[in-house]
Image (spheres, rainbow, N blue to C red):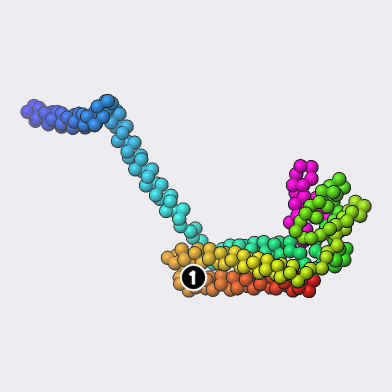
Amino acid sequence: MAIFLRRTLSFRNVLLLRSSALLSREIRQCNSASPHRVLSLPALEFVRESRRGFAKGRNKKKEDESAASTVEILPNMGPTIKANATSHMEAAIAALTAELSKLRTGRASPGMLDHIIVETGGVKLPLHQIAAVSVIDSKTLSINPFDPTALSNLETAIVESPLGLNPKVDGDRLIAAIPPLTKEHVQAICKVVTKSAEDGKQSIRRGRQKAMDTIKKLTKNYPKDDLKRWEKEVDELTKKFVKTAEDLCKAKEKEISSG
């Protein structure tokens, strides 16, 4: 029994000595790689743990990037895709409508002054924020400032605008007569309408492309029949909004020509 215990203890001591030798060799290698800095055993363990942490952090970053590049999958993505595309296209139509309302026609329209910027009290503001514009008749506008002291600033801004208007002071308001458009003016404004129509349709098509890109990312998550149905719905939606843009521009051109 005593002989067995002595052999067991000797074997354990050998293992301990070998472990110590291996650790000492690793410390010497680290020290030889950086002769100006001596690493102790705790420092060496710190380096090991830091490397492990760095590797884990790098893998976590890759996982986060992969997750960010994917689309959030819902039970039925069709209504969501269509709603997002509709919102984008409605915004394009709203922008086109606002742009067309700024164009001068032969008829009086309150919106034709919206783009005029008035400087009053050292601050530049859109005209509609400092005055109420109303239509007296088809050829005359009334501009009523909220602050009567801004009347002269309003008059200056309207005269300097490219609309060709020459308003007159009438008490606490301005009266602006809309002069008839010349043939050259009509042609020039119609070109602007055409350009605005193309910009609006391009914006609508960008909404379509965004929806189609989203659908393509879902090929592994939904049946092909569902994906084709959604693509068809987006195409029908696009045609509807493109036609709306074209109708708006045709109506504006007709208004300009008849004025």
Q: Is residue 41 above or below residue 191?
A: above
* Residue 44 in sight: yes
* Residue 244 in sight: no
Instruction: Write the start and end of the magenta stretch as one range.
Output: 111-132
Q: Residues within 10 Å of mark 1 (few under 14, many from 20)?
A: some
Q: Is residue 224 left or right of residue 4?
A: right
- The one nearer the camera, 72 or 122, is 122
Which residue occupies 44% across, 67% down?
219
Q: Position of residue 128 (x, y in %)?
A: 78, 54
**The N terminus lies in quadrant:** top left
Amino acid tagged 1:
Leu
Q: Is residue 208 above or below residue 150?
A: below
- The one nearer the camera, 55 or 185, is 185
**Which residue is the site of mark 1?**
227
Q: Is residue 200 left or right of residue 254?
A: left
Which residue occupies 54% across, 73% down?
232
Q: Position of residue 37 (x, y in %)?
A: 28, 26
